[in-house]
Image (cartoon, rainbow, N blue to C red):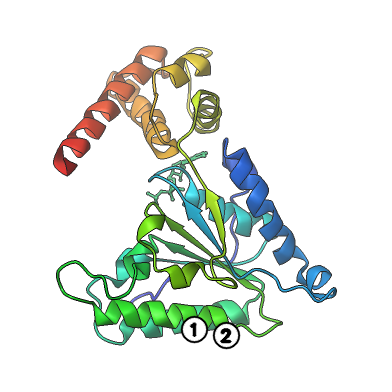
Amino acid sequence: SKAQLFDKNTNVKITFKDVAGLEGAKEEVEEIVSFLKDPEKYTSLGGKIPKGALLVGPPGTGKTLLAKAVAGEAKVPFYSLSGSDFVEMFVGVGASRVRDLFKQAKEKSPAIIFIDEIDAIGRARGKNSFSGGNDERENTLNQLLTEMDGFATKEHVIVIAATNRADVLDRALMRAGRFDRQIFVDLPDLNERKEIFQVHLKPLKLAENLDTEFLAKQTPGFSGADIANVCNESALIAARKNKKAIDQQDFLDAVDRIVGGLEKKNKIIT
Ligand code: ATP
């Protein structure tokens, strides 16, 4: 049987209230929601709806979550693939996968296409470090550019891509009419970490009224994904101790564990 070419979700339940903090980024993508909800309102005055937006920021900061929330708010289908899936792909497969993805999204227009880790396919062409150029990756990138240039006026597909390496991207991707909007999604500050804790504490069974300000202060440099991880770990730690509910000490133990994991990860990198 044929492997799934990309993920498709026609009924996204995630909305902006699931995305804590990121007020600036949310404000910017609000415009995309508005285009998708009522494209004719904009095109009737002769304007062209933007085709792409690039979310730029460190890992785990909520880029995928934000892109999904755009689809959820606009109530449009969400098609996604990851650039890393294209690494080591057979000749022709990458380009045809991109073609297929756009074809399906256009049929269901208005729609969102999300491309995670776009740097894996969108690196500047002809500057590949050791292989001296990866033709298949370039074919895939060229197909993506072709597709973005080729929308008919009635096809309202907006492509949102995410990267933590905007500096390595091929300039052609940023040209007008492609990913000409860049939206920064940064690590959360103290207040944002507090809000992210509030979101991820909600499904947990807590022993006491936990002080989210205190938790936020224990987690400087943590991403939203790290905080989600802390919340989940704390539940597992409490369960292992046969507790009926999670208390502050379980959170502190979970933070220690995550910090340990992050330090290990950094050691491997450096
Ligand atoms: P990557 O660059 O590694 O793909 P990303 O920026 O796309 O990461 P997400 O995949 O959106 O990050 O985040 C992972 C998980 O972390 C989310 O599903 C969510 O549970 C949590 N998370 C991250 N940021 C936030 C946020 N701002 N508010 C609430 N939850 C968040």
Residue 149 visible in the snapshot: yes
**In the figure, 249 relative to 100: above or below?**
above
* Mark 2 closeness class: few <14, some 14–19, many ≥20 residues within 10 Å: few
Residue 2 visible in the snapshot: no
Residue found 59% across the figure and 46% down from its top: 25
Q: Nearer the viewer, residue 65 or 8?
A: 65
Identify the amino acid type marked 1: Thr
**In the figure, 207 relative to 3: above or below?**
above
Q: Nearer the viewer, residue 208 or 175?
A: 175
Identify the amino acid type marked 2: Gly
For the residue labelled by badge 2, is the local secondary structure a helix, a strand or a loop?
Answer: loop
Residue found 31% across the figure and 87% down from its top: 92
Residue 150 shows which numbered tag?
2
Residue found 30% across the figure and 19% down from its top: 253
- Contact, mark 1 vs mark 2 (Cβ under 8 Å): yes
Percent coordinates x, y for residue 255 in the rendering: 33, 23
Q: Does the residue labelled 1 lie within 8 Å of ligand 1?
A: no
- C-alpha span from label 1 to label 2: 6 Å
Percent coordinates x, y for residue 11 in the rendering: 60, 62
Q: Quadrant of the N terminus?
A: bottom left
Q: Taking 237 as reference, is 96 left or right?
A: right
Residue 146 shows which numbered tag?
1
